[in-house]
Amino acid sequence: FEPIYDEEIKKNGKVDHNRSLELQRQEPIAEEDEDKVSPHLTEDKKEPRMIKKMLDLSLVADPVFLLFAFSNFLTTIGLISLPTFMPINAEMVLGLSQSNAAITVIVYGIASFFGLIVFSSVGDNALPFKYGKDRARNRLWIYSWFLMISGVASVFVFFMVDQWVFTSYCFIFGFFITPYRFTSVILVDFIGIERFTSAFGLLLLVQGIADFVGPIICNKIYDITWSYDLIFTFCGICLFLSGIMLFTIPFIKKRRNEVGFKNSAEKHCERPLLH
């Protein structure tokens, strides 16, 4: 409240604390604090304000969030569909029995368990090299690179005609796809904790749509081509694209910060003395 004190000093030569408190009370109340200072508000007035706070539609115009949401849409298609078709591919293409085909999903689950432990430890710590001190950047790199690796491995499933080769692929995929669990943390790194509630809600909506659309597309691919290999290829391409497109986000954020700094500097610069 330094402006209030400065005004009082200029007028009276001293600070009138009673006057200062009066001026402070006249200041507009922030919207987020209005409910606290107005406990008498009825529920029908509080609910719209609460919904407005939780549903931040300005995220729809945020290119960083839109790019991450589209990436997550593609990731969800691959992540949901591929484990479903692993035992089917082992049984129908490789000719394994149902019990042996089920091993592929078991291996995938075990690999996911160990991957979750490993990548959770790595994602929370700085890496021991020059560019590994930024934890947020480390998480983005791990997330993107291993999505791309999982996608590339899935594209070449049609080469895997041996039981143990395909089972090894299931293990590799289950282990390398685990950084997908970084989704919520990376979202906070991108948009901040203040907007996380709205952003994560919209992201769950995107994931739900992908959960619904993904299996339909994969089944349609099989109905047209009668090939499970092309399903793995399609999902692999989705995973690869979802990973590689995230490398553009740091440049988008950097450019946006530069533009914001430039606009702020132009707004607060003084007018020239010469006319």
Image (spheres, rainbow, N blue to C red):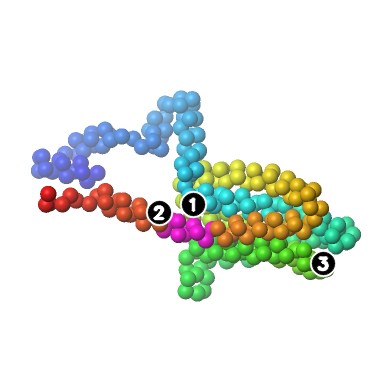
Tell me the crowding category of disc 3: few under 14, some 14 to 19, or many 20 or more residues within 10 angstroms, Cα based. few
Mark before the other along the chain sequence, 2 or 1: 1
Q: Is residue 208 left or right of residue 36?
A: right
Q: Quadrant of residue 21?
A: top left
Q: Identify which residue is drawn at 13% across, 43% down.
A: 9
Q: Is residue 250 magenta?
A: yes
At label 2, the amino acid type is Arg
Residue situated furthest front in the rendering: 224
Q: Secondary structure at mark 2?
A: helix
Q: Secondary structure at mark 1?
A: helix
Q: Name the foreground residue: 40 vs 255.
A: 255
Tell me the crowding category of disc 2: few under 14, some 14 to 19, or many 20 or more residues within 10 angstroms, Cα based. some
Tell me the magenta residue range: 246-254
Of labels 3 and 1, the one closer to you: 3
Q: Identify which residue is drawn at 65% across, 51% down.
A: 76
Residue situated furthest bottom in the rendering: 129
Q: Position of residue 206 (x, y in %)?
A: 60, 45
Q: Give the CA distance from mark 2 to mark 3.
A: 49 Å
Q: Position of residue 86 (x, y in %)?
A: 78, 58
At label 1, the amino acid type is Val
> Which residue is identified by label 2?
256
> Which residue is identified by label 1?
64
Q: Give the CA distance from mark 2 to mark 1.
A: 10 Å
Q: Identify which residue is drawn at 75% across, 47% down.
A: 220
Which label belongs to residue 55?
A: none
Mark before the other along the chain sequence, 3 or 1: 1
Which label belongs to residue 161?
A: 3
Q: Name the foreground residue: 127 vs 256.
A: 256
Q: Quadrant of residue 262?
A: bottom left
- Magenta span dominant secondary structure: helix
Q: Is residue 224 left or right of residue 45?
A: right
Q: Is residue 88 left or right of residue 245?
A: right
